[in-house]
Amino acid sequence: MVKIYRKSVSLSGLWVSTNERLSDFYASSWQRGESPLPMLVARLVLAGVAMAILLWSLIEAPNPYWLIYLTNWGLLLDVGMLICGIIVSLEVIYNKPYDIKELPWYASLYWAVFNIAITLSIMITSLYWLLLYDPNLREEMGARAFWLDVSTHGITSVVCLAELLLSRTPVRLLHLYQPLSMGLWYAVFSAIFFVVGGTDINGNHFIYDVLDWGQGKRTSIVVAASMAGLVIVYAFVWGVALCRDRLSTLLVRTTSHDLPAAPPDRHMGV
C-alpha cells in the first residue's frame, strides 16, 4: 500500500522496519483474503524467468569483467528481490508469524531490495535503449546476442513490473533514497574504476562510454541527469503502486475493521 505522509515524518518511516500489515509482503493485490500461496506461485515463476536470464548471461559471455556492468548489477538485484520474496512467502507458510508493525528481518530485506531493484531495472532499460543501443550493430551482434540484450535490458523490467503489479508491497516516497544511493554508489564505483586504471574487455579505461571520467564535465552531467532520472522512475513506480492499490481494493479486495461487539438491545432482549 502506498503511504503518503502529510503531517510528520518519523525516523522509523525512513527505513523498512515498520508497516501496518505483514500481509502486504506476501499476499497479492488481486486476491481476496491473505493466503501467501498465489503470490508464492507468481514469484516462483518470475524467479525462474529471471534466473534463466542470469544463467544465459553468464554462459553466453563468461569473462572476468561481467560484474563491472550496471546491467548485471541490476540482474543480480532482480534475482535477489524475487528470492527474498519467496523467502517471505515460505516463512509465512511454515512459521505463520503474527501480524505486527515491526517487520521481521526477511520482510525488511525484501522491501529494501524491492525498492532498489524495480527502480534500477526500469532505469537501466531506459538508459540502454536511449543512450547505448546501436541498431547498426544488430547484424554484427548476431541473433543470440541481440535477444540476450533484449532479455537483460527489457524482459527483466517486465519481470519487475509484474512483481510490482501482482504484489501488495508498499511503496513510500520516503524510500527514494534507497535507489538513489545505489545509483550514486555505481557512479562512485565507475570513478574509482577509472582512477585505478581499470579496463573493460576491450581495453577501454571506462565501463561505459557515457561514464568516461576522462571527460569529467560531460560524465558529471550524465550522472546528475541519471540521478534525476531515478527520481522520475521512482515517482512512476510510486504512481503505479498507488493505482494498483486503489483498483485492487475497489475491484477485488475486501476490507475489514475490528469493530467492538454491539451491546444487547434492551428493548428486544438480544
Image: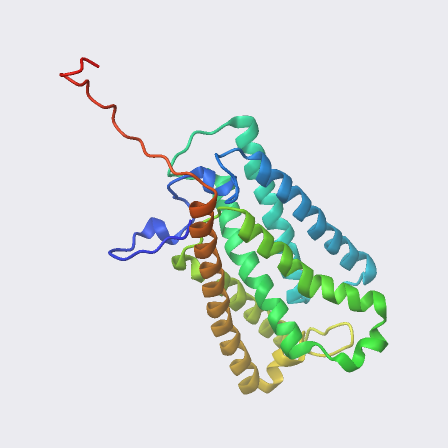
Nearest the eye: 80 or 29: 29
Measured as percent of width and height from the top left, residue 258 is found at 31, 31
Q: In this view, does 235 lie above or below 161?
A: below
Measured as percent of width and height from the top left, residue 174 is found at 38, 58
Q: Is residue 234 left or right of residue 120?
A: left
Measured as percent of width and height from the top left, residue 262 is found at 23, 23
Q: Residue at 67% across / 64% down in the picture?
A: 154
Q: Is residue 21 above or below residue 142?
A: above
Residue 260 visible (yes or no) = yes
Q: Is residue 160 left or right of residue 239?
A: right
Residue 196 visible (yes or no) = no
Q: Residue at 48% across / 59% down in the picture?
A: 240
Q: In this view, does 204 lie above or below 37?
A: below
Query: Which quadrant of the figure has residue 64?
Result: bottom right
Nearest the eye: 73 or 45: 45
Measured as percent of width and height from the top left, residue 35 is found at 53, 33
Q: Residue at 48% across / 43% down in the picture?
A: 252
Q: Residue at 48% across / 53% down in the picture?
A: 244
Q: Residue furthest top?
A: 269
Nearest the eye: 78 or 252: 252
